[in-house]
Image (tube, rainbow, N blue to C red):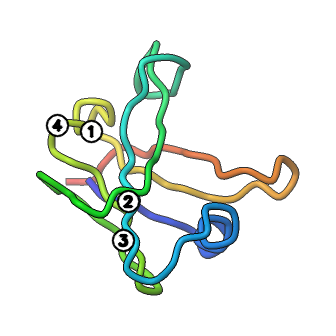
Amino acid sequence: MKIVISKSALTWFKDEVELKKGDKVKFYPKVYGSSPVQEGFSLGFTVDNTPIDLVTKFEAEGLMFYIEETDMWFFNGHDLHVDYNPKTDEIEYSYTQTKV
C-alpha cells in the first residue's frame, strides 16, 4: 500500500493547514460518511507528530503523511491518492487497487 500526494495537494496542506517542515499528517477512518472503499466510513486527517505503528508514508518538502497499521482495514487493498480540486478549493481522495 502506498500514499501519493500531488504537488497541488501538498501546496494546499502547507497553505490551508499551515504545515511547516517536520510536521506529520496522519490519515485515519472516520465513523461517518462514505467512501469508495468502505461504506459508512470516510477518510480524515490530523496533524500528529507521534506515529505509533506507522505502516506506510509519503515524504516531501520536509513533511510526512502516513497511515498506521490499525487503520489499514479501511483501505481494503487500495493505495491512497490525494489531489487538490481548484473548483471546490478542497483536497480529494481517490483509491486504486494496490499492485502486488
Per the image, label 1 sits on a secondary structure element best described as loop
Kind of residue sitting beneath label 3: Met
Where does label 1 land, which residue? 77
Q: Residue at x 30, y 49 (%)?
A: 98
Q: Which mark is residue 70?
A: 4
Per the image, label 4 sits on a secondary structure element best described as helix
- The alpha-carbon separation of the residues under discs 1 and 2 comes to 12 Å
Q: Earlier in the sequence, mark 2 or mark 4?
A: 2
Quarter of the image where one finds residue 100: bottom left
Badge 4: residue crowd in 10 Å (few <14, some 14–19, many ≥20)? few
Q: Are marks 4 and 1 in contact (CB under 8 Å)?
A: no
Q: Are marks 3 and 4 in contact (CB under 8 Å)?
A: no
Badge 2: residue crowd in 10 Å (few <14, some 14–19, many ≥20)? some
Where does label 3 land, which residue? 64
Q: Work out whether residue 95 or residue 20 is closer to the camera in this orientation and state it.
A: 20
Q: Is 35 left or right of 56, judged from the image as shown?
A: right
Q: Earlier in the sequence, mark 3 or mark 2?
A: 2
- The alpha-carbon separation of the residues under discs 2 and 4 comes to 16 Å
Per the image, label 2 sits on a secondary structure element best described as strand
In the image, is residue 26 above or below residue 70? Answer: below
